Image: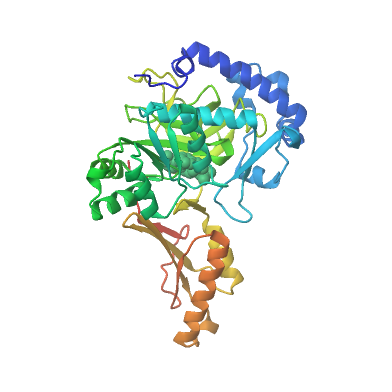
C-alpha cells in the first residue's frame, strides 16, 4: 500500500535534501532582499548581503524574525509578491494587535496542500477514504489546509468545520468517515459523545490527525482506546503556512518536518545561539519555497528537540518532538491564542489593578479560563450586586478582545499571593506539556 504522497521527496537522501535547501535558501534570500524593503533593512542592519549566503551553512548569519516584526510590518510589509499574484490570506486566532496575516499565491496553496496530503497518506489515507475535517474553516488554517490535502489524496472530503457535534456524528456514521481531522480536545469530546450515545459500533474511523494544540501521550491513548483508531499528531503555524509543516508517521515518535520546504533550527531562546541536534530549544523556521510570504529564521517560540535518527517508515526528513513548552507566555485555550498581557490590558482599562491571576483548566476535554482580580479600594464599598455588574462588564470586554468566554471573579484585596520574583500570573492546571 502506498504510504507516501511524494515518495521521491519524502525518502530523498540527506545529500539531496541539503542540495534543495542550499539552492532554495540562496534564491529566497536574494528575492526578499530585492523585493521586500523590510528584509533589506533588517539585513543591512545585521551587515549581511545575499552574497554572504552561499548555502544553508550560512543561515546563522541572517537576523531572526519575530511576531513583533510581523506586527510592525502589518499588513503588507513582508509581502514578497505583487498583490495581483496573491489569492488568499489566512490569519491566526489571536486578536486585535496580535493578529498575524499570512499571504498565499496559488503556488503557495498548492505546496501547502501537498504537505497536508503527505500527512494524510502517512496515516494510511488513500482515495478510498472518507475524510471528515472538523478543524475550523475560514481564517484559521486548520480547515482549509486539511481540506486541500484530503482533495489531493482523493479522499471523499467532508468539510464539516468545527462545532455542532450532533451533525458531526450523524455524518460520521451515515457516510462512514474513516479519517478524522480535528483538535485533540475535540477528538476526545467526540469520543465521549460517541460512547454516551452508544454509537461505537456504527463508526468506521481508523485514524485521526490531531494538532493545533499541545496534547499528551495519555490523551493519545485515551482517544485511541475510545475510538479504536490510531491517533497521529500534526504541527504547523499560520506564519509558516498552517498544518502540515510537520506530521507523524506510523512510528508515532515525533513529526517529520517537510524539509524540502522549511529549514528547521533549534536555538537557545535566551542567546539566539544555534544548538546541536538532540538539544532542547526554540524551533526556528525558514521557508524556502514560498512566494508570497517567505519567512526567514522565524522564531516559533515552541520548545522542542530535533532528531535525524533513521525512521522505520523510510522517510528521511528530520523529526521534531511534540512541542514541550513555549519560550513566551502565549496560551492556547479552546484553540485560541491568548497572551496574558491582553487580559492585563482589559483589567487596567476597566480601572482594576494588575494584581490578577489567570487559572486555566480542562474538564471533560473542554478548556476553561478564570480570571481572578483583586478589587480596588473604590470597589471595596460596592454591593454584591454592583460587583456582579462589574464582573459581567469585564467578562464582556474580555470576550471582545480574546474571542472566548473567561469567567471573572473579583476577589478581596491582598488575596492573590505576592511573589518575590516574577509574579505568577498564570496557573495552567492542564499540564499539557508533560511528556
Ligand atoms: O494551529 C495550525 C494547525 C492547524 C496545526 C491544524 C495543526 C493542525 P496557529 O493557530 O497559528 O496554527 O497556532 C500555531 O499552535 O506555534 C504551536 O504553539 C501550536 N501547535 C500547533 N500544532 C501543535 C501540535 C495552527 N501538534 C501554534 N502540538 C504553534 C502542540 C501545536 N502545539
- Image position, residue 41 (x, y; %): 75, 35
Left or right placement of residue 18 versus residue 219 in this view? right
Q: Is 364 left, or right, of 281 in this rendering? A: left
Residue drawn at 59 percent across, 64 percent down: 345
Q: Is residue 391 left or right of residue 84?
A: left
Q: Quadrant of residue 232?
A: top left
Say above or below: 108 vs 303: above
User: Residue 329's spot in the image, x, y percent?
Assistant: 50, 51
Colouring used for the render: rainbow
* In this picture, residue 61 sits left or right of residue 434: right
* Quadrant, the C terminus: top left
Residue 424 seen in the figure:
no
Is residue 3 or residue 175 the one in the foreground? 175
Query: Between 258 and 108, which is closer to the camera in this rendering?
Result: 108
Question: Is residue 328 something one can see in this rendering?
Answer: yes
Q: Establish if 129 lies above or below 137.
A: above
The location of residue 24, given as percent across then percent down, is 62, 20
Between 420 and 90, the residue placed more toward the observer is 90
- Measuring from the top left, give residue 174's x and y in whole percent: 34, 44
Amino acid at each position: 500500500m502506498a504510504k507516501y504522497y511524494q515518495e521521491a521527496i519524502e525518502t530523498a537522501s540527506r545529500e539531496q535534501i541539503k542540495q534543495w535547501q542550499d539552492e532554495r535558501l540562496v534564491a529566497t534570500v536574494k528575492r526578499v532582499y530585492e523585493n521586500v524593503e523590510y528584509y533589506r533593512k533588517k539585513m543591512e542592519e545585521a551587515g549581511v548581503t545575499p552574497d554572504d549566503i552561499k548555502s544553508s551553512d550560512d543561515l546563522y548569519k541572517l537576523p531572526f524574525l519575530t511576531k513583533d516584526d510581523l506586527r510592525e510590518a502589518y499588513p503588507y510589509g513582508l509581502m514578497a509578491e505583487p498583490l495581483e499574484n496573491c489569492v488568499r490570506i489566512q490569519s491566526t486566532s489571536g486578536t486585535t494587535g496580535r493578529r498575524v496575516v499570512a499571504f498565499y499565491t496559488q503556488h503557495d496553496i498548492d505546496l501547502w496542500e501537498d504537505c497536508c496530503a503527505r500527512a494524510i497518506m502517512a496515516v494510511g489515507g488513500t482515495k478510498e477514504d472518507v475524510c471528515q475535517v472538523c478543524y475550523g474553516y475560514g481564517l484559521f488554517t486548520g480547515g482549509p489546509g486539511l481540506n486541500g490535502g484530503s482533495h489531493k489524496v482523493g479522499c471523499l472530503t467532508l468539510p464539516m468545520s468545527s462545532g455542532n457535534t450532533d451533525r458531526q456524528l450523524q455524518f460520521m456514521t451515515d457516510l462512514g468517515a474513516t479519517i478524522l481531522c480535528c483538535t485533540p480536545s475535540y477528538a476526545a469530546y467526540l469520543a465521549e459523545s460517541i460512547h454516551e450515545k452508544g454509537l461505537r459500533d456504527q463508526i468506521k474511523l481508523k485514524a485521526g490527525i490531531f494538532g493545533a494544540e499541545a496534547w499528551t501521550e495519555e490523551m493519545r491513548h485515551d482517544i485511541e482506546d475510545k475510538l479504536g483508531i490510531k491517533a497521529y499528531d500534526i504541527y504547523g503555524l499560520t506564519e509558516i503556512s498552517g498544518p502540515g509543516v510537520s506530521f507523524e508517521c506510523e512510528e508515532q515518535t515525533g513529526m517529520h518536518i517537510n524539509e524540502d520546504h522549511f529549514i528547521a533550527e533549534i536555538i537557545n531562546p535566551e542567546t539566539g545561539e544555534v544548538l546541536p541536534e538532540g538539544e532542547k530549544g526554540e524551533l526556528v523556521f525558514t521557508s524556502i519555497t514560498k512566494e508570497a510570504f517567505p519567512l526567514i529564521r522565524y522564531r516559533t517560540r515552541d520548545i522542542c528537540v530535533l532528531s535525524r535518527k533513521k525512521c522505520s517508515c523510510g522517510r528521511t526528513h528530520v523529526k521534531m518532538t511534540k512541542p514541550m513548552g513555549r519560550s513566551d507566555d502565549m496560551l492556547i485555550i479552546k484553540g485560541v491564542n491568548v497572551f496574558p498581557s491582553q487580559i492585563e490590558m482589559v483589567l487596567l482599562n476597566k480601572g482594576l489593578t494588575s494584581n490578577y491571576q489567570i487559572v486555566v483548566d480542562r474538564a471533560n476535554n473542554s478548556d476553561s479560563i478564570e480570571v481572578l482580580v483583586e478589587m480596588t479600594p473604590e470597589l471595596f464599598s460596592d454591593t454584591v450586586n454592583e460587583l456582579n455588574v462589574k464582573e459581567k462588564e469585564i467578562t464582556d470586554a474580555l470576550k471582545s478582545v480574546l474571542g472566548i468566554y473567561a469567567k471573572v471573579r473579583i476577589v478581596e484585596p491582598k488575596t492573590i499571593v505576592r511573589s518575590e520574583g516574577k509574579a505568577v500570573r498564570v496557573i495552567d492546571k492542564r499540564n499539557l506539556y508533560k511528556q
